[in-house]
Image (cartoon, helix red, strand yellow):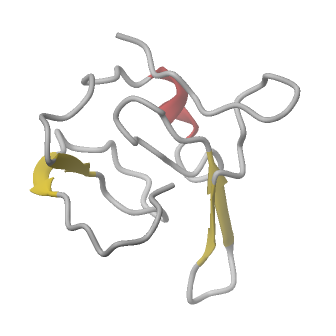
Amino acid sequence: MTHQWQTDTSGRPDNFVMDSGDASGRTHNGPRCTVCGFTFCEHCWPEGWQQTCPGPPPEGMEYDWIGCGTTREPEVPELTPVIDVGGPRS
């Protein structure tokens, strides 16, 4: 299954859905899959565009993807329970 990237107003993958900085002041940004939640920094790891989507996680669970700033390939994500804190989820 291919990732279904969240899109911007023009219908293109939104490369700033994930947008953060690190301690050294570098900026990391990239897309997010609307099915599994996979995100990656398109600068640190451009191969992320070719990753296969594992599909939606089971009900009440979410995938725990590795963080940004790494150049290694993501491992098979672990499933973790979704904790509802009462606010909207992005």
As drawn, is 23 to the left or to the right of 87?
right
Residue positioned 49% across, 65% down in the render? 69
Q: Is residue 69 left or right of residue 19?
A: left
Residue lying at the far front of the rendered structure: 86
- Residue situated furthest right in the rendering: 10
Above or below, 5 relative to 27: above
Q: Position of residue 33 (x, y in %)?
A: 48, 34
Residue 2, image x, y percentages: 43, 13
In the picture as drawn, the residue positioned furthest to the bottom comes out as: 23
Please say if 23 is above or below 81.
below
Q: Is residue 32 above or below residue 90?
A: above
What x and y, as percent, mark residue 84?
Answer: 25, 67
Instruction: Give the residue at x 35% y 20%.
Output: 52
Residue 70: quarter of image: bottom left
Q: Residue at x 57, y 53 (%)?
A: 44
Q: Is residue 21 left or right of residue 82?
A: right
Which residue is at 30% across, 44% downward? 74
**Residue 47, placed above or below residue 83:** above
Q: Quadrant of the N terminus?
A: top left
- Residue 25 position, x and y percent, is 69, 85
In terms of depth relative to the viewer, which is nearer, 7 or 29? 7
Number of callouts: 0
In the displayed orientation, state which residue is furthest to the top: 1
Quadrant of res 57: top left
